[in-house]
Image (cartoon, rainbow, N blue to C red):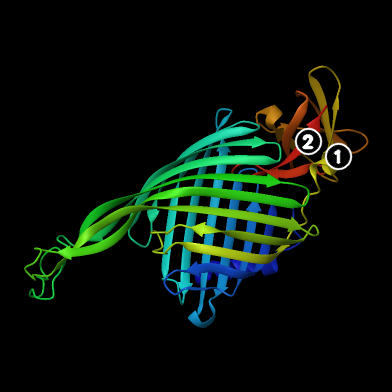
Amino acid sequence: MRRVLGTCALLLGAAPPLEAQVGGQVDLGLGGAHLPRRGESSLWSLAPELRWLTPRTRIDVSGEYRDFGAQGRGATGRLGGSWFTPMAQPVGLELFGEARGQSGQGLAERGAWEVGPRLHVTGAERGAWIGARAGMDAVGGTYGWEAAVWRRFGALSVQILGRQSTQSTDVTPRGVIDTLAPPPDTLSAATQRQARVLTDFGTWLRWEGRRVQLAAAGGVRYGLVQPGVSPRIPGDGSGLESSRGRSSSEGWWQADITYWMTDRFALASSVGRHPSDPSLLAPGGRFLRMSLRASLGRRAPAPSARLAAPVGFRSERLAAGIVEFSLPAGKARRVELMGDFTDWAPVDLERDRGGRWRIRLPAEPGLHRVNVRYDGGPWLVPPGTRPVADEFELVTGEVIVG
């Protein structure tokens, strides 16, 4: 886990001037997570985050260092990545992986990882996906499935997700806690496997304005186990036997508000309650955090400022169903374009005498998404378009076609 945080800090400190496909932020906050067992909150926290995005790839590195005051200090970290490839339109395949960890006083030294595929069915303003996951956590092996649907209503986006995972844990055959019995037979089987099922349902809402971003989420986690003990034979004093415990559920919720004072600095506030996390043996609790956020990349101007008069990338309707797209490309020897109007298949542009690259394609009026590539390099957001991220955070350029 320390390696994850170290890598995150190194990348944040050494990051060059950021391109459209790279982003990140650093939060310096006051407040933090409530510790139910000790009854105190963290005093301050530092949370860096770095993202590297292309139309087909996403890599996230994030961490959080928290000072618990008299209770000590702790840190958490996450490294995640996804690779997406289109299949038959509108179906796409995503392969993902994630590793998490935590350490420090007040936190158990634990780690977890998982990998799996997701199958997406995506439209311009709505979509759905279903996936499978497998990995290891603090208890043992895990496997499960997940599914979600999402919809965008202008600046508001909504997602509903369901997830179920099964943990394979080690338990004693009889679970005996007996101070009167002789020592157990060391030659007998010490443990056996037991499956525990964890189920999550949640809803996320996000609204993004010119300077204010609002987010809210809530859900329920089922299948949490509260262990207990009971007499082996009630009343005979023969010792205690550990019970499987009773299954319980926990509700969780979160509300966030971010106000961007400039293109690089914002005030952010987050309040809510997170559920227990059996994968890292972490208890649930309430949290409240106020923070100063510094963006490592300049935020895109509001849609009205970018889409009304785009500079660089242009579209001009020539006939009822034909649009000419053009853009400058400097000294590039080859320029390719792909978008929702090409079913995300790359097409080559031609250079005119004035140095602009052009192509004529069928496209309906309305809002479209597009990317360009120069000389076989990475896919980028065209100059003069608005960078936006889709449901799996792949960045494309948004443009209005008349």
Q: Mark 1 or mark 2: which comes first in sequence?
A: 1
Q: Secondary structure at mark 1?
A: loop
Question: Left or right of 13: which side holds 127?
Answer: left
Q: Residue at x 39, y 53 (%)?
A: 135
Residue 338 seen from this side: yes
Instruction: Give the number of callouts.
Output: 2
Residue that sits furthest to the front in the current view: 235
What label sits on residue 310 in the rendered view?
1
Residue that sits furthest to the bottom in the current view: 70
What crowding class fits label 1: few (fewer than 14 Cα within 10 Å), some (14-19), or many (20 or more)? some
Q: Residue at x 62, y 31 (%)?
A: 123
| For the residues bearing labels 1 and 2, Cβ distance under 8 angstroms | yes
To which residue does mark 2 refer?
Answer: 399
Q: Nearer the viewer, residue 225 or 136?
A: 225
Q: Nearer the viewer, residue 176 or 231?
A: 231
Q: Residue at x 67, y 66 (%)?
A: 291
Q: Secondary structure at mark 2?
A: strand
Question: In the image, what residue type sits under mark 1?
Answer: Pro
C-alpha span from label 1 to label 2 = 8 Å
Q: Quadrant of residue 8?
A: bottom right
Q: Position of residue 249 (x, y in %)?
A: 38, 52
